[in-house]
Image (cartoon, rainbow, N blue to C red):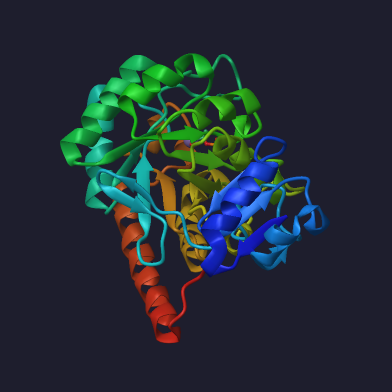
């Protein structure tokens, strides 16, 4: 149950509710809204009921992530980037894997020149085969950090397991939880205890509610700096695409949750020539940003070469995406509306 409190008596009613239910059940407060799990209106005292403006019973189980509790957009601030909110558009780009100090430095420049403010790259890689390249580990983190700093960028990298969380937190500005780990609940709990923003990628067989509930594990630990990523799901047809890009997940999530939504057309499509069209589709669907893989020599990439954009294609793509976003923004300001509840 979410209670919207009467403005005038909100502080007093909040105290009453906290004293009454705070020890027994999960209780979350956001401004004049209080979510209490496992309770309904009849459980409220007469004084508490007097402070109620409205009660919402029909809300997602992932209540902290819901707009019902938190109507306004979450905005994540990194040193060089703002993620979320109505106006901005976040561009993250980089190679799938960190391959070497010089290579990631070169890719960082390409990412930066194309308008990206966050450098991505895997130092610990979740590979389908144990015999495939597993990443450069801590050296990769150092190279990524150095490359990002050289360009004045923020840096995101994947955390595959709790064992490496502390060292990754020393280098990264933002943590990525990959699709394969979306429901690794102990890892979600662990990142929930850090103060690093998290990009949580949708599992390839995860429903939208599964994704919301996974994000709730992070929020339950006290970390509310969360962005969600649609990166394609498995369907019956993977002949022409690596996954199926669930573009409708974007407006659905924008409606359900206040967390920023970042679209990943690279992993959704798996083929470089499909990345730009889906980057545009994701932008048009209302995403707050993109994460895209790039490589100067895709045929020689250590991982995910077929989906990597070459530098010149990446630059064209970002030009188109930023132009489209500007047009979309002008529609929103003409209507005087912002996409939120
Ligand atoms: C990646 O970002 O390189 C990656 C492995 O992504 P995903 O977890 O979405 O497959
Ligand atoms: Mn990849």
Report the side of 211 relative to 43 (left or right): left
Does 148 appear above or below 56? above
The residue lying furthest to the left in this view is 150
Does 186 appear above or below 33? above
The residue lying furthest to the bottom in this view is 334
Q: Position of residue 155 (x, y in %)?
A: 32, 36
Query: Is residue 244 visible in this depiction of the protein?
Result: no
Towards the viewer: 60 or 296: 60
Please give the count of numbered marks on the rendered protein: 0
Q: Quadrant of residue 202?
A: top right
Towards the viewer: 138 or 72: 72
Q: Position of residue 316 (x, y in %)?
A: 32, 59
The quarter of the image holding the N terminus is bottom right
Q: Position of residue 76 (x, y in %)?
A: 39, 49
Towards the viewer: 77 or 203: 77
Report the side of 112 relative to 197 (left or right): left
Q: Quadrant of residue 267?
A: top right
Report the side of 177 relative to 252 (left or right): left
Report the side of 32 relative to 248 (left or right): left
Please give the name of the residue rendered at 36% of the width and 67% of the height, measured from the top-left corner: 87
The quarter of the image holding the C terminus is bottom right
Towards the viewer: 110 or 204: 204
Please give the name of the residue rendered at 56% of the width and 36% of the height, measured from the top-left corner: 218
Query: Is residue 191 visible in this depiction of the protein?
Result: yes
Q: Quadrant of residue 95?
A: top left
The residue lying furthest to the front in this view is 47
Please give the name of the residue rendered at 52% of the width and 23% of the height, measured from the top-left corner: 160
Please give the name of the residue rendered at 56% of the width and 56% of the height, measured from the top-left corner: 12
């Amino acid at each position: 149950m979410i209670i919207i409190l009467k403005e005038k008596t909100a502080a007093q009613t909040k105290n009453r509710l906290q004293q009454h239910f705070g020890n027994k059940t999960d209780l979350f407060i956001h401004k004049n809204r209080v979510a209490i799990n496992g309770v309904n209106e009849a459980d409220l005292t007469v004084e508490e009921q007097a402070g109620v403006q409205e009660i919402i019973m029909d809300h997602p189980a992932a209540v902290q992530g819901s707009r019902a509790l938190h109507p306004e957009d979450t905005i994540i601030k990194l040193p060089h980037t703002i993620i979320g909110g109505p106006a901005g558009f976040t561009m993250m780009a980089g190679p799938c894997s960190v391959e070497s100090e010089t290579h990631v430095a070169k890719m960082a420049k390409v990412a930066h020149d194309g308008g990206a403010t966050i450098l991505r790259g895997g130092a610990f890689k979740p590979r389908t085969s144990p015999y495939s390249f597993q990443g450069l580990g801590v050296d990769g983190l150092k190279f990524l950090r150095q490359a990002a700093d050289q360009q004045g960028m923020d840096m995101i990298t994947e955390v595959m397991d709790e064992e490496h969380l502390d060292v990754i937190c020393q280098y990264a500005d933002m943590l990525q939880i990959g699709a394969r780990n979306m429901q690794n609940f102990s890892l979600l709990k662990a990142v929930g205890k850090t103060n690093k923003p998290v990009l949580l990628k949708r599992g390839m067989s995860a429903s939208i509610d599964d994704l919301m509930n996974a994000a709730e594990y992070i929020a339950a630990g006290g970390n509310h700096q969360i962005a969600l990523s649609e990166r394609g799901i498995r369907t019956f047809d993977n002949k022409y695409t690596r996954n199926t890009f669930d573009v409708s997940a974007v407006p659905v999530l924008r409606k359900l949750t206040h967390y920023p939504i970042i679209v990943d057309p690279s992993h959704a499509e798996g083929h470089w020539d499909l990345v730009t069209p889906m980057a545009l589709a994701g932008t048009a669907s209302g995403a707050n940003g993109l994460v895209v893989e790039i490589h100067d020599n895709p045929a020689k990439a250590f991982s995910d070469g077929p989906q990597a954009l070459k530098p010149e294609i990446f630059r064209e793509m970002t030009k188109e995406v930023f132009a489209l976003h500007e047009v979309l923004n002008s529609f929103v300001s003409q209507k005087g509306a912002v996409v939120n509840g």
